[in-house]
Image (cartoon, rainbow, N blue to C red):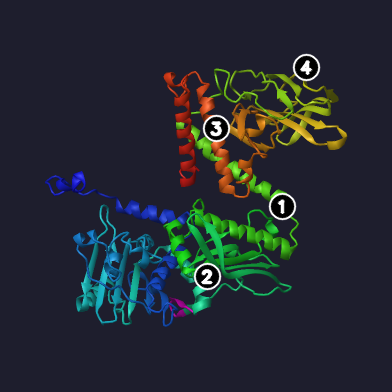
Amino acid sequence: MSGRLIDAYLGEIGVRRTVRNWPEDIKAIVDGYRAYTTLPHAVQKDAIQNGWSARKNKKGREWSFTFQLVEGRERQYLLMTDQGTTGLTGKVLKPEEYEEDLPPEERWGRFEGVAFTQSRSERTLGSRGRGKFIFVGASKEQTILYDTLRDDGTYRFGFRTVIKTESPVAAYDGEKGKVKLGEMTDNQIEPLSTVGTRVIIVEPVDEVVEAIKNGLFLRFIGETWWEIISKYRACIKVKCGEKEDLARIPEEFELKKEDSKEFKVWIRQNNIKISVSFGEAKIKNLHIVYCKDPVPEDIRGVAIQRDGMKICAIEPRYMGKEIAERTFGYINFDADTEELLLEDEGIEHYSFDFRRSLPSNIKRVVEEGMITFAREKLGYGGDAREIHREQQRNAERRALTVVNNFARALGIGAGPGPSRGGGGGERTPKRTRIQMAELILPRPDDLRINYGEKVRNIAIKIVNDGERDVDMRVKLFLRFYDKPLKTFLEQDITVRANSTTGNLGPFEEIFTRDEYPNMGKYTIVAKIVSLMDEDKGKELDYKTKNFYLEEDPPRQGLFEGCEAFGFPDKEPIKYWMGYSEYGSERGLILYYNLNHPGYTSVSENEDDLAEYILRIAGQEICIYDLMQENPILFRDNQRDESQEILKQERKVVGELIYRFRKGEVE
């Protein structure tokens, strides 16, 4: 093949460029940053990272950065100037020159273009082309000016603005550039006189101006760039009127190296190796500090650093508030690992894709480090089982959100349940369990009841598939949210081995305003508790059915819950990874097996456990759909072909996991 099909036609008459709504593009970029932070924070972060990446000396010697708010006669300007840098070297490029890979020295062309990065070996912090547009977005006039002075003494001035369908740029060299700067700023700003680069935001928005004047802007710099301030004594200044301030590390961010009455410290360093999918990565330092007093929210958690810049923080999710609000620190890496991390970093430089191998493993190391630190140094009494259970709950919640969104997008699970009687029937492997009858409500397939209406068929049976009799206490009652209201049945019974009791019930209840003044969700609860000597008080099973008084039920997905327990060690049940059955609100409850080796291998990682649950859920979506009179996934001629069913199941499970790992259905 000689090239793309379309290439030969691109020069013909009638071929037009795509028109873009640039103001909306700028708004989208600003909104992307606002998802993580404020506009002033984003401005300082992108400005400094551009300057720091262009430093001549890798140790930062003679490097500095200055923000200066200038009050002009007609408008304000925010000047952002770096020194000790290369300046914007290179020529003003023609459009066709962007067709080729840009060499490292073409910094001016890269600044004027959009998303023209260097080669992998030359890539820098700010190489994705969004920083210049956050500066445009921070301008009331959506305009920035910029000039540069290079080592060879050449000067250049340029501007960028945004109009409806374009983002024009211009460049003027030498004396012409100096004259043009004077014209455009009413001679309020002198041409750059030291080697480096300056970006000028014309009429900065009020939010940025206010942050500079009240000191927040200075705080943002210290919180983001504390590492280069500490390690390289980086000089970053903010000028406003007659006032000039030097950025400092936040005073609360005291990275103590030894324990004291005020602080407890946990340090791991010297290139800790972590295994990832492609081999090994190296952590240079993991430094965690606990302060006896709460620290400000902006420094809490362990900051992930890259090339001296804080990207985001990992918080101690599985520990109490008392620890979370007093813990801070950082983690940084060797140069090779930083380069690899760039692949998984968000384009705004405020996040990582923690579904990817390297960030996921870093997060695991930090979280495990915080837990170990809390136990060894703080005497944290958190039960390891409870921490593990919290990880489980997070994985379950995430999996349910993903699978319900996925099923909803397919059009599955919006209705009241199956019409063919299958998909999710009672398959419970618990040896001793409750069978709860379907409530009879005033209207079929509607969980709402109104005053004066009755709920009927409140009844249960107890099944004992074990080889011995079981003594137990049975309770059947009504509650409003967490408040018990009425007990229908409470008694001690013995259920014979390999038997099922008769109906316990049925009961019924009429709902009047006098007896039930509260509107909302009501629940029928059935519970059985062991009275056997060896496990007296142990809950054997628990089932619920919900309905709503004078209120429409919330929108439900296909799955209404997720629960885990160890399946019995007998064939074929011990081989099951999981299954589903109908729950209290006529959705499916997804159960998964704690005794399965597949669970054991993923139980310590939240992402992997969520994927494990989703694999089971994907199969259950197919089973559910097969049982419908009008299935969505299966055509009539596929429903009786096992090979076709298996192919569709592979597709559904594969797509569900793919979209989860890509973050497309969360």
**Which amino acid does the dot numbered 2 rest on?**
Arg
Residue at 20% over, 60% down: 95
- Point out the stretch of residues depicted in magenta: 233-243
Q: Earlier in the sequence, mark 4 or mark 1?
A: 1
> Which callout, 1 or 3, points to the residue nearer the camera?
1
- Work out which residue is located at the far front of the displayed protein and give it: 571
Q: Which residue is mark 4?
A: 502
Marks 4 and 3, the one that precedes in the sequence: 4
Please give the residue where the numbered disc 1 appears in the rendered image.
384
Where residue 561 appears, as percent x and y from the top left, is 62, 35
Identify the secondary structure beneath mark 2.
helix
Q: Residues within 10 Å of mark 1 (few under 14, many from 20)?
A: few
Q: Quadrant of residue 464?
A: top right
SS class, disc 3: loop
Query: Which residue is the site of mark 2?
Result: 219
Residue position for label 3: 557
Three-letter residue code for mark 4: Gly
Q: CA distance from mark 3 to mark 2?
A: 44 Å
In front: 349, or 102? 102
Q: Going from the N terminus, do you reach mark 1 or mark 2 first?
A: 2
**CA distance separating discs 4 and 1:** 42 Å
For the residues labelled 3 and 2, say whether their Cβ atoms are less than 8 Å apart. Answer: no
Q: How far across and how far down the image is residue 239, in percent?
A: 44, 77
Task: Determine the main secondary structure of the stretch shown in magenta.
Answer: strand
Q: Amino acid at mark 1?
A: Ala
